[in-house]
Amino acid sequence: MKNRFACAAFVAAIVSATSVSAENYEVTRLVPGSAFHGVHGLAIDKAGHLFAGSVAGAALYEVDIAGGTAKVAIPAPIGMADDIAFAPDGTMAWTGFLAGDLYSRKGDGPIKKLASGLPGINSLAFRKDGRLYATTVFLGDTLYEIDVEGVKPPRQIMEKMGGLNGFEFGPDDKLYGPLWFKGQVAKVDVDKAELTVVADGFKVPAAVNFDSKGNLWVVDTALGQLVRVDPKSGTKTMVAQLKPSLDNLAIDDKDRIYVSNMADNGIQEVDPATGQARQVIIGKLALPGGIGVTSENGKDTIHVADVFAYRTVDGATGEVTEKARMHAAGVTLEYPMSATAKGNDVVLSSWFTGTVQVIDGKTGATRDMLHGFKAPHDALVLADGSILVAELGTKSLVRVSGEHGKDRTPLIGGLEGPVGLVGGSSGEVFVTEAFAGVVSKIETNGEKTVLAKDLKMPEGIARARDGKLIVAEVGAKRLIEIAPETGKVTAIAANLPIGLTGAPGGLPTHIPTGVAVGESGTIYFSSDIENAIYKVTKK
């Protein structure tokens, strides 16, 4: 979609810059970008071309295995692909997880929508006779047969299997796949709707695939392992120890195995004989959203909600340090999309899981994990230790206190798309209202004052030492400075790589652009388009 928030009526004019010219600031890339926006499903066509899907990026990519690069094969939003499969005749099909759509295309022909209205549509596979099967996972738990002509509605075969994820038909014409929530690999007779467990004892199996010899290969996302399974006996052999957050795999006609890793934003090639892995492509960051900065002894540390990981970045060198990654065994993390940091408090929030996580910035330990929010888009710790949450799903700011956040009191409602939050000097907070195109001040009693209006999708917000507000005006692809006393808007930097064209369906199916300011006045922002971090300094 052209407008990330699906607000077709929102066409307010851009505010013209005044006083300080954007030319007085220098914008430099601190952390380089990467190809994908989280990488998931993999598939190889008959010619040996490798394709990869991204849900958050809503695009389907073709990967140059030798060159270690990737290009968009099918752009957003139709290209959203959690999984990809090729039919015997070469037709490619893919699943749009958030949109609930399933598409196909033969060669360079037209794209055909085969099914819709299936939120959580996740994995798919073609049978040797060309029939197509797909499952919903996470937002559902159902197995369907899909009409390859897109005329008949999906036919339900089974449900409540336990998360039948990345699967494939075996030589015996049975459907083999992992049960994500049960730690098992199963086979399904799709004609009889019968499920049989083949192998057990996995932590979180994510996907399976067969090689030319009839071996079944399984990736365990929590343990980061590539495991070979004898489909007859269920005997397991761990062949390669990789990093956690594995998502999918594909095997070519020479039995070379390609494995995707969400947190690495990368793909590895694994030799099945030796277990040795070669990195085909990788990113420093996966998909950076909200950011916060802590400063100590003149050194800025940027805390990044990286969707599939929580990472920190050295503000001087750009060195990236990983603190935690999604799905790793024993790790507490739930798709962080926004971050704030102050003192020793780092707060991550995720609209996808409805969670707010408080982390000790020094040790990296989780102090609290709060659940049950409706699309939280930012959160910060207040002076009294309570937490203020920008809850987009209820259009409100919610004050949270008590054990595990059990006490929740709305501070103010009726906010149009509360996305970014930052605290003031006297207990007040400032919030960006993306839908309304305004930045507002909220007093401790809930009284609201609009400081700036007629903005285009303001998202990330930070406060400089002089009290000025720094805002990512995503719809205008620029950073602006707002004087709280007068509401005067000044352009800082323009033509920025922010505002990823994402999935259909509007908010909250996007990753917010983050902004933070270090003690020295250096401004940092995340680029969702490039998966990069930038710094902005006065010349």
Image (tube, rainbow, N blue to C red):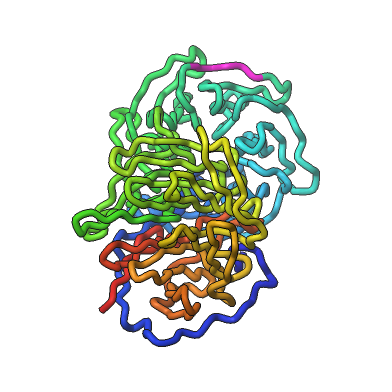
- Can residue 199 be seen here? yes
| Residue in the picture at 61% in, 43% down | 87
Above or below residue 233? Residue 223 is: below
Looking at the image, residue 243 lies above or below residue 26 = above
Give me the residue at 57% from left, 35% from top. 406
- Which residue is at the far top? 233
Q: Nearer the viewer, residue 333 or 179?
A: 333
**Closest to the observer, 446 or 127:** 446
- Image coordinates of residue 152 in percent, x first then y, are 80, 44
Q: Residue furthest right?
A: 152
Which residue occupies the foreground of this view, 525 or 420?
Answer: 420
Work out whether residue 134 can be spotted: no
Pick the residue in front: 208 or 87: 208
Q: Is residue 420 magenta?
A: no
Please report the residue visible at 38 percent of the width from the left and 19 percent of the height from the top: 237
Give the magenta part as a residue range.
195-200
